[in-house]
Image (cartoon, rainbow, N blue to C red):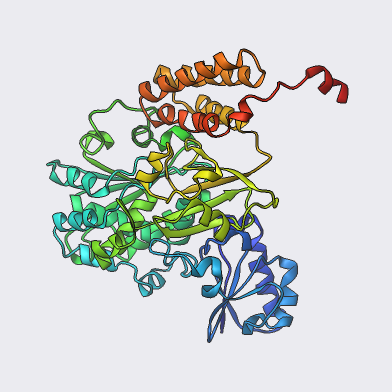
Amino acid sequence: MITIYVPRDAAALSVGADEVAAAIVSEAKKQKKDVKIVRNGSRGMLFLEPLVEVETAKGRVAYGPVAPSDVPALFKAGLLEGKAHKLSHGLTEEIPYFKSQERLTFIRCGITDPLSIEDYRKHGGFEGLTKALAMKGSEIVEQVTTSGLRGRGGAGFPTGIKWKTVLDLKAEQKYIACNADEGDSGTFADRMLMEGDPYCLIEGMTIAAIAVGATQGYIYVRSEYPHAIAILKEAIALATTSNWLGDNIQGSGKNFELHVRTGAGAYICGEETSMLESIEGKRGIVRFKPPIPAIEGLFGKPTIINNVMSLAAVPIIIAKGGEFYRDYGVGRSRGTLAFQIAGNVKQGGLVEKAFGVTTRQLIEDWGGGTATGRPVRAVQIGGPLGAYLPPSKFDVPMDYEEFTKVDAMVGHGGLVVFDDTVDMAKMARFAMEFCAIESCGKCTPCRIGSTRGVEVIDRIIADQDRDKNLELLEDLCVTMADGSLCAMGGLTPMPVMSAVRHFPDDFHKPAPNKFLAEAAE
């Protein structure tokens, strides 16, 4: 029997992966060929989706992007034997985009059947958890600290410190909360992992629970990810049945239950305390700090809150040791990060690389430049609250501290590319308006500041007292940065002021002549 892999990843489904799988089954029946279809995750080369792979003696051979109408010709050309065709890319592992990565967190994604525990274990799954079950909590925390793992979100807070805080507290109940409310523009790594390798996240959360003595966990997923939610729920049920979750895990005497909670689409619930409020069934608004969630988190109990990429890095850290993970990266930014390349780019997708890679390398070596063929003018890194960087900053290494030096942030590793036709004054307005729409409204600098900010930028674009309004905009951004309760208002000035600072000409353009514009119509 010949095994053919067709992704069930949402990105692949959006361009017809289900129809391609059905067409392969249909054609195989016509030709009386015995094939097995495995619905795997995505390899991350989204520009080639749907990417069909065929298992051969030499390895898996890739074809893509495949449309249902391509299937008869592929069979005729020798798809089942991995023979050449115009859609063939040879051995998947040898495709330059894929081969030049350093995959630790995504080592199984696109390779295994996401819901097969047997497949997961065959590719190193549950090795970390098996080791953790025989370790003291303090030993697990020590390995995570040694690894240098930091939060794969905005602040990059050391994971080991957060875990040790919860470990050292005495409480009848502790919780693990996974922030999977991936709402940043240009990001999809969390979704890809939840859909393509859900047991990795489950294993990481279970290790965290064993480390600090937690018995309950929640994965908070945005409602826009229905496929991820369905796969997670099924994976949790299968892991519980197989005793990798639940009571007396693998006879260890350790217990951990895991639940999925669906968010209602509020960007603010990506902020950790708003997320806790939402899980508790309340309106998602920011909590005052202190106390920090590690001390008083979910339902007032000590809580570890990490995002998907942080928790998914834990299994390999425990399986291979903190030093192994620490050997990747630069400075205080250790390990790898799943960079997501999107926007005006030829080859969008996910690239897992050690910290230290540059923006220029990601855009040119993996992204292939802009889809339009025009020069890159700006890249926004770190989501809608991240800075817009000009080409002069493209050689700054992806490193938390180095990015801070240029008033930017690595964040979740999302890159949105713009060519030279972009109007950066309009992008600054978009950033401010995004804050105005998504603010929870609890604090004045964010709630009112963002609304006034949109009005000020509109006046600048309309050439109304431009210099005075630019000065007012800067003062307003300082107030928002210093006075907001959370990063929603506190970081909105980053994209706004980066646009003003790096692209000043766009804020000094002559205002459009309304009379001429109307005449042209």
Tally of numbered tags: 0
Question: Which of 399/338 is in front?
Answer: 399
Residue 346: x and y, percent? 64, 56
Residue 29: x and y, percent? 68, 79
Residue 204 in view: yes
Kindly indicate the quadrant of the structure image that contains residue 242: bottom left
Quadrant showing the C terminus: top right
Residue at 47% across / 68% down in the picture?
113
Q: Is residue 249 above or below residue 436?
A: below
Q: Is residue 382 left or right of residue 95?
A: left
Q: Is residue 141 above or below residue 418?
A: below
Residue at 55% across / 41% down in the picture?
390
Residue 7: x and y, percent? 56, 64
Residue 480: x and y, percent? 42, 22
Q: Is residue 465 left or right of residue 294?
A: right
Kindly indicate the quadrant of the structure image that contains residue 66: bottom right
Quadrant showing the N terminus: bottom right
Question: Which of 363/10 is in front?
Answer: 363
Residue at 48% across / 36% down in the picture?
264
Q: Is residue 243 above or below residue 89?
A: above
Question: Which of 316/33 is in front?
Answer: 316
Q: Is residue 122 above or below residue 297?
A: below
Q: Is residue 451 left or right of residue 205?
A: right
Residue 244 in view: no
Q: Most extreme residue toward the bottom, as rendered?
A: 57
